[in-house]
Each structure stands twice: as structure tokens, then as C-alpha cells.
Image: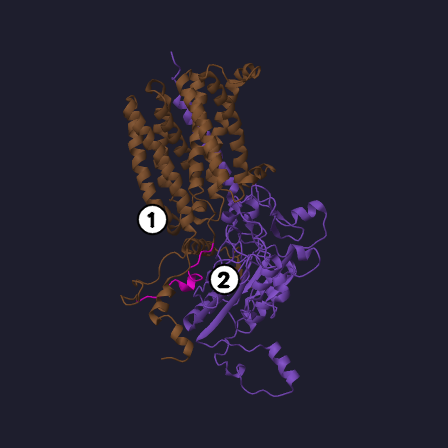
Chain colours: A brown, B purple
């Protein structure tokens, strides 16, 4: 049926229907079970969720963070844990462990900071983070922790480099001062290393991203466990076994804690908030991480005196930590894509409060 | 014990300013979906174009949603009888929740024929006045339009402002939340901090449409790329005692602008009137200072549940729980230090 001459320019009717299902990006689950061309089986229940969302479009926005932030989370954990191992090794007189962990700490700090800067929309303004000290912003506090840690880790790493090169760095009279402050600076690195590994839990949880915010009770615990096993794992790779016993102990403890808190993470969550951690790309990574953590943890505990087994276990633990960080980041980003992850938990908690008789704190009122 | 949330008034008190908190009241019951607010906002604030002029197949909404390049967004929702009933029921449920009583609402007559084109008498002036005072209701029992112009909420407890690490986001003397584009380094934390999904980093956007190429004399660069962008409540107009562009242009006064307290008052007045007229679906969004964001600067009157308009049903400012989160950060850090120290017990090299 043609009503106007211009109708001949219209695409085929079928194509128009098809496009209707082809909703704008980030729309989450598909409606209906149709194969897309309209010819296959149609869903009997169409558009059921329409009335609960605005065309299935996201309500909260994901932060513009990608793998670089996962890499920063991982590197920050490795750096912080290495700073602690270095201080311990220094106190215990384990020279190779001390040297390697100090160099790892500085390397991971430089790498992590690089990723953090590259992820900014305006990398040249990185230092604007430090024009203020703002407790309400975990990102700001984290930058100060990172700077404090980086300074201390840099000083002790410089001493190590100086030692390796046979005191060839052009330090002059500074060398005496550096050696004098070596132990206290190493202790400062260890002290800053702890919050460096744990503050990222608050960084992600202090957002409106459903899965991250719902993880607030355990995310810092999971992240320090992950940091402990990752930094110990790297130490097991870099350092001969006769000096890595403390690293193996920490690795085993970290792996056990990581497994515990990875399970506990979803416990207080609404099913819609937990779902992105259990399914899809994040769920897959977490299952791999679990397997690698178990394998690496057992390897570190039982086979750690064998150099090859130590390297393999260390690599498994570090990989598991990296996968965990990626999975948590991706689960958060994915939880913003479907408004269901926002609407369902919020409606549930609103209903729960109303059931308790609290009716004065809703954003929706009638006068 | 600790509360890291910043709120309007702190700054005003600290600096002894005598400005009042400003805000919008968006009465969606009289929005006609003309999108003049979107256009006025784009023009005044020189906000670049988003996307590639695609049709989104969501009624008349081809804008999509709020973002770095969209500071006003008109939502279009088409509802059938079942959804209208559902909206009225959910509104009725709200009314019966023990909130301030406004009397039993009468059911609106389903027969709206007398409003839609039956002959009327009297002089043209009286007829126009009659129409202005009692606007015809185009809705039928089987179908209705919902149109709503969404905007930044300028929250009392603003998540974006709290988490901003550079201090680029600040509270103005009008109680509004504004980004300083020369300070923002585009870290993106505010994007995650906003419970309404308003603020966004400007990573894309164009100024030049095809007929308006770079060599045009109207050509201009995309401003503030890589930084967070959102509604400023036309800060530059406020300092000159002007009304924000969207409110100024709104032809039906659906977007009202004024002192925030007066906006809330007129919103309460309007919803009371609508309930008295039997429109139980009417409800306010953001007029409660006791809600998760401490009330918002841009109050809305909605005709269905907030999620139908793409608004969160129970937004909470994440910073509210930050003291507990920092406590966890501290415990985790102490635990890790203790674990590391324990690992070195007895490890001293002989």
C-alpha cells in the first residue's frame, strides 16, 4: 500500500520492526526471544520490563575506567605488599628478598601511577589531585597515599640500585644521609603500603555503581588479601627459595583470605547486585582466579622450597590477583548497563524500610 | 560520628553571603515535549552535539539521556490503560502510606469528551482564559503521554562533589553544583559518584554538523574535552540575575525557576491540587530533605514511578557510608601489616 511517492524510498517493513529490537548501546538484556528478523519465534511476553525502566536505558553511568584502572589496582597491591615484605626482609636480614621487593615496589608504583595518569581525561593535569586534601574523596586520599609510598619506596630502591651498581650513582654526600635514613624510610614505605593496598576498596565502594557500592563491607578486605598474595607471589618469582619463607607464609595466608572474602563479597548483596560478579566476563574471571588461588596457595604452602614450583605458584597467585581486580572492575561497569541492577535493589530496600514503618525518607512524596 | 558530606549553606554561612539556594521545579504534568529547553540549553552553554543524529526509536525521544553533551533531556513515555492504572495505584499507595493527608481523592471522570472539542460559548477572551485555567486533557482512558524534562538534580548531598579529588566540583553561592573546567583533570570519579547518572566525561562530541563545516564562520572547537561536564544551572546567568536558559524558554512554565524553598512549596501546592482533582498518580520527586540525597535542587512532579522516567527510585549519596568504608580500609590495612609481620616471625637469617 503506497500512500505517497516517497514511500517507495522506505526500507522494507520487516527491517523497521527488526530495528526496534536493536536498541541503543548499553541497553542490557534483550526483550523477547525473537531471532531478530521477526520470522522466527516471537516471545509471548513482550516488553514486560518496559514499565520498570526507561526503554531499558542505564540509570547510573559507569566511570570512564578500563583495564588501565584494573592494572593500577593490581600494581598498587603489588607495590604496597612489596613495601611491607621489603621492610620485613630488612629487619630479618634477608638481603636478596629486601633488594628484589624494594625494586618491585618502585617498579609497580611507577607502572601503576603511569596507568592512573593515562586513564585521566586530561593527563597533564594529574597534579591537580594534589592542590587539595579532601577526606570525602578516596581518590584524593589515595593520591596522597600513593605519593607518600612512592617517595619512600623510591628512596630505598635508589639505595638498592646504588648498591647493585657498586655505589656508582652520582649521589655525593647524599649517600651518607640516604644510608642513615634507610631503615626508617623502609618502615614508612611499609606503613604507607598497607593503606595503598586497601584504600582502593573505598575508592570503588564510594560510588553509585550498584555492585561496587554493595561490596562496601568486604571490598577492602578482599583487596588487601589479593595484594598480599600478589606481592608475595612476585617475590617468590624473583627471589631464591632460601629467602622467601616469609613470602610463602604471607602468600598462603593471603590466598586463604582472598578465597574467604571473594565468597563473602556477595553475601550482603541483593541478587541483582551480585549477578554481575557471578555471570558474564567477570564471573568467568573470578572462577579462574579461584582455581589459580587454590593452586598457587597450595603450591606456596607445600612446594615452595622447589624453585620451579615456587615460580609457578607465584605466577598463579599474581595472575589470580590481576584477574580478581579486573573482574571487580568489570562487574561494576556491567552493573550500570542494565537499569535492573539499580532499580530492583533500590525498590527492595525502599520496601523493606516501609515494611519497618519508616515512611519519611523516600525521595518520592505526595506533599 | 563522622560525616564527610558537604551540603549547601556551609559555604554561604562561611563566607557570609546573602544569596539563596536556587532550584527548578519541573512540573511534568504540563510539559508538552517541545524540547525547547534542550535547544536553549545547548545554545546558551555551547554544548556540543552528541551522536550522529540517529533515531533512537523511543517515541519522540532521540536525545537518549543526560550526559556530558546533554544537560536537559526530555523523556517521552507512551502508556496504555494498564500502565495508567498501575501508576494511579502506586500513587494511591504512596498517599495511604501515612503521609500528610489531603483527603480522599475523587476519581477523575473517564469521559473526557467535554474537554476535547465540544463547543464552548462566551467571548474568545473568556474561552482562552478558560482553556488556560483548565487546560484540556489530551489523555484518554486508554492512552496517555508522559513527557518530562530531566536535568542535573543539584543535590543537597552531592555525590559527584564529595568524591571529586581535585576540588573542580564546587558548591556555588546559589547552592548549586558546578564543575570548574580549568581544574577538572577528567579522572571520572564523579561519573561513578552520581546516583542519577547525570555527570559525564566529555570524550566525544561534535560542533560541526555536515552543512556547518570547519571553514564556516560559525565554526568552533569542542570545549572542555576530557573533563567532566553537566548542567551549571546557568551559573553565568544567575550572577547577572537572569533565569536559566531552559526555564526562560519553557513555553508552558513546566520548568519553573526560583528560590529552592519556594520551588518545593509550589511543588507541594501543585501535587495537592492534582490530588484534589483526582489525579492520584501525581507525586513529587526530590522534595524530601530526609531522603538519601538530602533533597534535590531540581524538584519534579511525576505522574508515575520514578524508574519509568529513568530516575532511580531510592538514590543514596555514596559518601554517606564513607566513614564505615574508611573504617574497613583501616582494619584491612592493619590486618595486612599484622599478617606481614607475623610472616617474618622467626625468619631472621642466622
- Rendering coords of residue B29 (x, y %): 55, 69
Residue B244 located left or right of residue B108: right
Q: Is residue A47 magenta?
A: yes
Q: Is residue A117 above or below residue A183?
A: below
Q: Quadrant of residue B233?
A: bottom right
Q: Which residue is mark 2?
A: B63
Question: Residue B182, can we see it?
Answer: yes
Which of the 4 image quadrants contains residue A254? top left
Q: Which residue is mark 1?
A: A280
Quarter of the image that includes the N terminus of chain A: bottom left
Q: Kindly identify which chain the residue marked by label 1 belongs to.
A: A
Binning the other alpha carbons within 10 Å of mark 2 as few (below 14), some (14 to 19) or many (20 upward) gives many
Q: Nearer the viewer, mark 1 or mark 2?
A: 2
Disc 2 secondary structure class: loop
Q: Position of residue B185 (x, y in %)?
A: 56, 43
Q: CA distance from mark 1 to mark 2?
A: 29 Å
Q: Is residue B117 magenta?
A: no
Q: Which residue, as the protein is rendered here, is positioned at the far front?
A: B215
In the rendered image, residue B7, in percent from the top left (x then y), is placed at: 61, 48
In magenta, the rendered stretch is: A44-59
Instruction: Specify the quadrant that holds the C terminus of chain A.
Output: bottom right
Q: Is residue A168 left or right of residue B129?
A: left
Amino acid at each position: 500500500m503506497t500512500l505517497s511517492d516517497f514511500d517507495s524510498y522506505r526500507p522494507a517493513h520487516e527491517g523497521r520492526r527488526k530495528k526496534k529490537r536493536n536498541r541503543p548501546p548499553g541497553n542490557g538484556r534483550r526483550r523477547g526471544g525473537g531471532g531478530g528478523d521477526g520470522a522466527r519465534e516471537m516471545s509471548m511476553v513482550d516488553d514486560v520490563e518496559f514499565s520498570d525502566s526507561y526503554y531499558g536505558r542505564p540509570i547510573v553511568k559507569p566511570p570512564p575506567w578500563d583495564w588501565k584502572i584494573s592494572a593500577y589496582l593490581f600494581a598498587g597491591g603489588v607495590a604496597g605488599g612489596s613495601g611491607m615484605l621489603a621492610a620485613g626482609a630488612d629487619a630479618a636480614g634477608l638481603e636478596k628478598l629486601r633488594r628484589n621487593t624494594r625494586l618491585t615496589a618502585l617498579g609497580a608504583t611507577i607502572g601503576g601511577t603511569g596507568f592512573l595518569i593515562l586513564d585521566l581525561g586530561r593527563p597533564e593535569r594529574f597534579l591537580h589531585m594534589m592542590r587539595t586534601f579532601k577526606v570525602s574523596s578516596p581518590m584524593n586520599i589515595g593520591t596522597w597515599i600513593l605519593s607518600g609510598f612512592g617517595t619512600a619506596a623510591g628512596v630505598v630502591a635508589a639505595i638498592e640500585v646504588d648498591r647493585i651498581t657498586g655505589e656508582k650513582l652520582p649521589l655525593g654526600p647524599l649517600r651518607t644521609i640516604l644510608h642513615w635514613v634507610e631503615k626508617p624510610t623502609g618502615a614508612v614505605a611499609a606503613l604507607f603500603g598497607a593503606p595503598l593496598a586497601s584504600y582502593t576498596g573505598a575508592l570503588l565502594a564510594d560510588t553509585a555503581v550498584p555492585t561496587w557500592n554493595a561490596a562496601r563491607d568486604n571490598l577492602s578486605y578482599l583487596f588487601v588479601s589479593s595484594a598480599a598474595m600478589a606481592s608475595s607471589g612476585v617475590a617468590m618469582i624473583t627471589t631464591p627459595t632460601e629467602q622467601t619463607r616469609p613470602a610463602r607464609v604471607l602468600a598462603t595466608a593471603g590466598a586463604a583470605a582472598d578465597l574467604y572474602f571473594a565468597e563473602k563479597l556477595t553475601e550482603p548483596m541483593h541478587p541483582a547486585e551480585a549477578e554481575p560478579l557471578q555471570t558474564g566476563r567477570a564471573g568467568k574471571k573470578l572462577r579462574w582466579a579461584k582455581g589459580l588461588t587454590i593452586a598457587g596457595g597450595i603450591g606456596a604452602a607445600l612446594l615452595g622450597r622447589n624453585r620451579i614450583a615456587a615460580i609457578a605458584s607465584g605466577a598463579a597467585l599474581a595472575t589470580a590477583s590481576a584477574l580478581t581486580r579486573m573482574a571487580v572492575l568489570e562487574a561494576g561497569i556491567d552493573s550500570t548497563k542494565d537499569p535492573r541492577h539499580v532499580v530492583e535493589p533500590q525498590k527492595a530496600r525502599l520496601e523493606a524500610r516501609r515494611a519497618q514503618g519508616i515512611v519519611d525518607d523516600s525521595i518520592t512524596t505526595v506533599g | 560520628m563522622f560525616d564527610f558530606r558537604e551540603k549547601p549553606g556551609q559555604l554561604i554561612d562561611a563566607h557570609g553571603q546573602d544569596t539563596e539556594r536556587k532550584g527548578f521545579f519541573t512540573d511534568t504534568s504540563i510539559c508538552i515535549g517541545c524540547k525547547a529547553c534542550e535547544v536553549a540549553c545547548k545554545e546558551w552553554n555551547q554544548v556540543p552535539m552528541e551522536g550522529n543524529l540517529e533515531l533512537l526509536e523511543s517515541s519522540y525521544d532521540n536525545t537518549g539521556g543526560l550526559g556530558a553533551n546533554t544537560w536537559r533531556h526530555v523523556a517521552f513515555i507512551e502508556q496504555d490503560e494498564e500502565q495508567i492504572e498501575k501508576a494511579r495505584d502506586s500513587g494511591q499507595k504512596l498517599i495511604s502510606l501515612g503521609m500528610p493527608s489531603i483527603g480522599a481523592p475523587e476519581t477523575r471522570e473517564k469521559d473526557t469528551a467535554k474537554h476535547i472539542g465540544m463547543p464552548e460559548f462566551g467571548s474568545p477572551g473568556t474561552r482562552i482564559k478558560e482553556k488556560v485555567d483548565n487546560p484540556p486533557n489530551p489523555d484518554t482512558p486508554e492512552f496517555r503521554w508522559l513527557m518530562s524534562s530531566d536535568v542535573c538534580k543539584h543535590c543537597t548531598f552531592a555525590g559527584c562533589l564529595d568524591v571529586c579529588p581535585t576540588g573542580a566540583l564546587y558548591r556555588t553561592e546559589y547552592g548549586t553544583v558546578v564543575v570548574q573546567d580549568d581544574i577538572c583533570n577528567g579522572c571520572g570519579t564523579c561519573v561513578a559518584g552520581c546516583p542519577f547518572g547525570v555527570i559525564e566525561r566529555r570524550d566525544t562530541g561534535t560542533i560541526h554538523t555536515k552543512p556547518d563545516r570547519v571553514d564556516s564562520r560559525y565554526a568552533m572547537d569542542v570545549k572542555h574535552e576530557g573533563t567532566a561536564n553537566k548542567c551549571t544551572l546557568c551559573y553565568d546567568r544567575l550572577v547577572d540575575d537572569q533565569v536559566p536558559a531552559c526555564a526562560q524558554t519553557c513555553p508552558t512554565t513546566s520548568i519553573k525557576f526560583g528560590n529552592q524553598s519556594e520551588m518545593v512549596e509550589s511543588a507541594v501546592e501543585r501535587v495537592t491540587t492534582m490530588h484534589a482533582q483526582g489525579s492520584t498518580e501525581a507525586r513529587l520527586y526530590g522534595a524530601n530533605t530526609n531522603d538519601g540525597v538530602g533533597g534535590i535542587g531540581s524538584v519534579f512532579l511525576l505522574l508515575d514511578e520514578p524508574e519509568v522516567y529513568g530516575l532511580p527510585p531510592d538514590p543514596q549519596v555514596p559518601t554517606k557510608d564513607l566513614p564505615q568504608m574508611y573504617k574497613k580500609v583501616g582494619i584491612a590495612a592493619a590486618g595486612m601489616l599484622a599478617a606481614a609481620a607475623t610472616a617474618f616471625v622467626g625468619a631472621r637469617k642466622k
